[in-house]
Every structure is written in structure tokens, then in C-alpha cells.
Image (tube, rainbow, N blue to C red):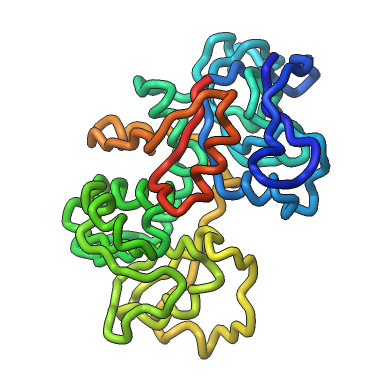
Amino acid sequence: MHAVVVTQPGGPEVLTYCKVEKPTVKPGWSLIKVRGFGINHSEVFTRQGLSPSVSFPRILGIEVVGEVAESTNQPSLAVGQTVMSFMGDMGRAFDGSYAEYVLLPNDQIYPVTTDLSWAELAAIPETGYTAYGALLGLRLQSQDHLLIRGGTSGVGVTAAKLAHALDSSIQVTSTTRNAAKTDLLTGAGVDQVLLGGEDPLPAASRFDKVLDLIGPKTVKDSLQHLNPGGIVSSTGELGGQWNLEDFEPIAAIPNNCYLTSFYSGDVDDGVLQDLLDLIRNKQVDLAPAKVFKLAEVAEAHREIEGKHNFGKLVVVV
């Protein structure tokens, strides 16, 4: 089969499109014919050698949509069934989805019912589930004012659209460091755009809920801009910082406010199907910003690292 292999850490040029052996099915695992996958910032970090648990050579890719090709778990995973998978040790401890086929543990494969195209479906797994799960954790209510920090990322754009699908009365403000992306955000349904990324928010700004995709680098600032009863969800690490430093909860979290997070590695297949049903019933447009071929994965990595990236990038095989 064809795959994209990384033999050593480095820039996008280390993503090598080549022929490799097709995986052989083993007990407890099933072979998935890859139809598409999204490109994620975590895969960029791994390619750069910043994931200490990952050894090379490795086929990256932490998510996939496709069809069951061979299964050791029939009839639950019937051949030809449309499935989705993401996270776990995929693309890290074992080879991932940057290939024509991927071998996955049965308990990490989720059958789904959908009429979306492969390109549309490929934009959903990690990005859509993260956005949807984080929004559920924020316990959005009618008339809430939601701030999305890191609003031009794939998760940020998706979260803005899903928030309005959940309740059209929710006001969404998204941040961007690039003023040129203001029209793109408003075109995606964002109600208000706030210029700035990792900088402190304007002193007087207040929000009911904050989806902080920049993460630990900005969480303490986000907490200081909550209305009473407000919630910050630190879901993402776009700021490149993994841990909260010098964090003293009593001082950092205002009275009657809350800090939470969402981890997409804990997958609830019922919530996943609810997400797909919401997208269908509310006709949410989650079409990817750009679609690449398998041989163009290196180009997709250059795009996601560039200044002009907006929304979700996917590969269709």
C-alpha cells in the first residue's frame, strides 16, 4: 500500500510518500480502508520530534474515517461498515492513518451512520468531537456569551458553528491574531471578532463561557474575564505550553466560577453519533477548508503551520 512515513524528526520534508507492506490483521484488531483523515497540530509536534513517547520510523495520523476491510469482531464491525477512529495510541505507539489502510484495536473503532461525503466526514473526528465535547462541558445556556480563544483553528471554527446549532441565541466571540481573518470568522458565523491571541484580554471584557484552545498559556487570564457562574474549558494547547505554571487555584479561579477541560481520547460513541445527528438535523456546514491527496500530506503540513491557515485541512484517499 501507499503511505506517508517519517523516519526521523524534522520539517514537512521528512514526510515521505512511499510503498510499504499492508498491515496484517491480528486478534483483537481490524483493518480499516482509509477514506480520509484530518491534519492536526499534534501530528506536527510529533513530526518535529516533540512527542517523547514516539519512536521512528512511524506512520503518523491520529484520526481516520473509512470502511472496515477485515475484522476480528464481526458482526459488530461488518466488512464495508462506515467507521471512525481517533486518538488512543494511533499514530504514536503504532502506525496511524497517513496510509491507504490502518490496523486498529477493535475497541477504538466506532461505527457511524451518516450521509456526509468522505471529505466532510474527515473534517469531524478529532476536531468535531473535541469541539462538541468541550461545548457540552461548558453547559451552554440560552443567551450565553461564548468566547473562543484560538478561533481560527479547526476546532475553533467548528465550535463556533456547533454553538449556534445548539442554540441560535448564543453570542460567539472569537479571537484571532490576524486581522485579515476577520471576514473569514464572520463568514463562519462568528458574531464578534476580538483581535489578539496570547495577549491579555481587554480589561473590561466579560463572558459567560470561554473555550480556551490556546490552553495553559492563557487560562489564568481567561478565568479573570468570567461573569459569575462562568466556566472556562481549557481544551487545546495551541500556545505551545503544556502545563499551568505557578497556578494557585484559590487566587486564580474567581468565586463561583469554574475551570474544566475536555479530552477527546475518552470517546463516547453515543455522543459521537449525537454530533453527527446534530450536523445533519441542523445542516451544519463543516466542510473542510482545503482537501489534499495522500501524496500531498507534506504540503498539508506546510499549510497548517502557515500564517494563512483557517479551518480544518483534510486528506481524502
Q: Which residue: 70% across, 29% down?
A: 16
| Extreme-front residue of the structure | 13
Query: In the image, 291: left or right of 243?
Result: left
Locate residue 225 relative to residue 110 in the image: left or right: left
Q: Nearer the viewer, residue 249 or 99?
A: 99
Residue 113: x and y in percent read 41, 22
Residue under the image location 49 percent in, 73 percent down:
218
Q: Position of residue 269 (x, y in %)?
A: 50, 35
For the point 46% across and 25% down, which residue is it? 112
Viewer-proximal residue, 307 or 57? 307
Q: Position of residue 97 (x, y in %)?
A: 63, 29
Total numbered badges shown on the rendered structure? 0
Q: Residue at x 58, y 32 (%)?
A: 297
Whether residue 25 is visible to the viewer of this picture, yes or no, is no
Quarter assignment of residue 109: top right
Along the line of sight, which residue is nearer the eye, 313 or 296? 296
Q: Is residue 94 visible?
A: yes
Quarter that holds the N terminus = top right
Q: Is residue 30 above or below residue 171?
A: above
